[in-house]
């Protein structure tokens, strides 16, 4: 690229960046204007446009945010401290960014930091969340699960805003326990006693996912064995059974194809030319018969999944999930002249005999791999709303 063109492009990009800061200022986005101008000055300390934007935007940011803070302090919204915290946070971030840029620091003479105000607001916001959570606990302890979930949100936020605030952490744990549904996943019976297969891998993988708490903080899943060990009375239980189950249904196909290549050198003869003996190629047609075999082992399964209310035996949801897997092997041989074979024949005939298929357990794992993904997504989506 021509150096003058490169310089022109850089200049255009640079000016566009400065204009973006000015545009934010004109639109009243003072925080964005300040941050953009500081970034421009960090890259180009003598940028006049950025200096002008910063000099105008920062005082406006301070005035605007402090005015909004005054208004919010006088409002009746119990959660107003969260909004106030946001405005203080912007002012403190602007202070930090300007201080980190010598060029920007020279532009602003009246920098203000609101550390104590920010920390005080954090404590007040935590206090409000703690009070709101505490007000919900009587209902939560009476079995109101919605109140328990809401209380958990408030106590968790109080602990997040001010770690160690009163006993918010313990109350968050209590409210989460009160809101938690206990779900037992029953063992999956195997549909065939004639095949040496086990669904242990599938079941354990599903339980590992459900135990990870990625579904919901308010759902705990137990295997049947885990539930019995602690004498758990579940809220829901999940039954799964294979409605359809075929492993290794064999299919073999043989294809016989004729091959012929013309004008192939099949030998040489000796002839006399100009009184001398010379050898000449003899051309002819070569033929072969190709036997190609394809063996398929088709496996499939259909899993029925039911979610049931434990105390009433009410069916809450039901879904079926299908999976399939086909194992394929190719081999073959030929009779006749090898020179009649095509490149594709040679590739497929490298294997002259069939190989041993995978054991039934491996085929079962392949079939249920796709079913696992479906079941995991289904249960996650169903319980995400609880």
Image (tube, grey):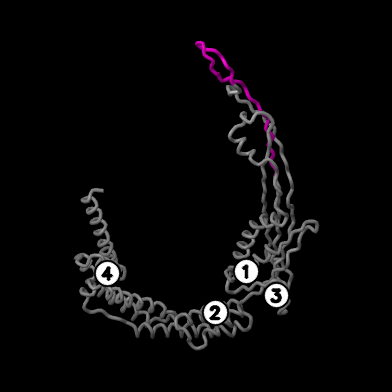
Is the residue 191 above or below the residue 207 in the image?
A: above
Residue 29 x, y percent position in the rendering: 31, 68
Name the N-terminal-most of marks 2 and 3.
2
Report the residue marked by disc 2. Answer: 152
- Quadrant of residue 16 in the image? bottom left
Q: Label 2: how many residues lie within 10 Å, few (<14), some (14-19) or many (20+)?
A: many
Q: Secondary structure at mark 4?
A: helix
- Quadrant of residue 121 in the image? bottom left
Q: Which mark is residue 210?
A: 1
Residue 168 x, y percent position in the rendering: 51, 85
Is the residue 55 above or below the residue 334 in the image?
A: below
The answer to whether residue 291 is magenta is yes
Distance between the alpha carbons at the discs numbered 2 and 3: 26 Å
Q: Secondary structure at mark 3?
A: helix
- Quadrant of residue 96 in the image? bottom left
Is residue 133 toward the left or the right of residue 329 in the image?
left
The structure residue drawn at horizontal position 27% and vertical position 80%, both measured from the top left corner, is 112
Distance between the alpha carbons at the discs numbered 1 and 3: 13 Å
Distance between the alpha carbons at the discs numbered 4 and 1: 47 Å
Q: Which residues are magenta?
A: 268-295
Residue 64 x, y percent position in the rendering: 30, 75
Q: Which mark is residue 38?
A: 4
Q: Label 1: how many residues lie within 10 Å, few (<14), some (14-19) or many (20+)?
A: many
- Asked if marks 2 and 3 touch (Cβ < 8 Å), the reply is no
- Asked if marks 1 and 3 touch (Cβ < 8 Å), the reply is no
Report the residue marked by disc 3. Answer: 226
Q: Nearer the viewer, mark 2 or mark 4?
A: 4
The answer to whether residue 46 is magenta is no
């Amino acid at each position: 690229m021509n150096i003058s063109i490169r310089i022109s492009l850089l200049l255009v990009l640079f000016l566009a960046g400065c204009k973006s800061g000015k545009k934010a200022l004109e639109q009243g986005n003072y925080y964005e204007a300040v941050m953009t101008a500081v970034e421009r000055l960090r890259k180009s300390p003598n940028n006049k446009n950025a200096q002008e934007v910063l000099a105008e935007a920062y005082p406006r940011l301070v005035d605007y945010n402090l005015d909004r803070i005054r208004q919010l302090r006088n409002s009746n919204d119990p959660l107003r401290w969260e909004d106030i915290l946001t405005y203080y946070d912007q002012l403190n971030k602007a202070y930090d960014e300007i201080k980190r840029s010598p060029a920007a620091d020279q532009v602003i003479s009246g920098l203000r930091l609101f550390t104590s105000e920010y920390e005080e607001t954090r404590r007040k916001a935590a206090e409000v969340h703690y009070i709101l959570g505490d007000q919900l606990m009587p209902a939560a302890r009476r079995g109101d699960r919605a109140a328990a979930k809401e209380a958990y949100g408030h106590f968790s936020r109080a602990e997040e805003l001010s770690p160690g605030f009163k006993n918010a952490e313990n109350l968050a744990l209590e409210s989460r326990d009160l809101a938690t549904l206990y779900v037992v996943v029953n063992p999956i019976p195997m549909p065939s006693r004639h095949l040496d297969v086990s669904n242990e891998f599938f079941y354990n993988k599903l339980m590992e996912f459900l135990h990870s708490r990625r579904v919901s903080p308010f759902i705990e899943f137990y295997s049947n064995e885990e539930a019995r060990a602690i004498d758990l009375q579940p809220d829901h239980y999940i039954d799964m059974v294979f409605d359809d189950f075929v492993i290794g249904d064999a299919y073999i196909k043989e294809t016989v194809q004729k091959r012929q290549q013309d004008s192939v050198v099949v030998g040489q003869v000796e002839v006399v030319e100009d009184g001398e003996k010379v050898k000449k190629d003899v051309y002819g047609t070569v033929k072969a018969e190709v036997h190609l075999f394809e063996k398929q082992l088709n496996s499939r399964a259909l899993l029925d999944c039911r979610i049931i209310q434990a105390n009433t035996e009410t069916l809450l949801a039901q879904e079926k999930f299908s999976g399939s897997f086909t194992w394929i092997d190719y081999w073959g041989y030929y009779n006749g002249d090898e020179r009649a074979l095509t490149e594709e024949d040679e590739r497929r005939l490298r294997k002259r005999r069939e190989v041993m298929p995978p054991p039934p357990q491996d085929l079962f794992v392949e079939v249920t791999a796709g079913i696992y993904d479906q079941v995991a997504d289904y249960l996650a989506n169903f319980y995400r709303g609880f």
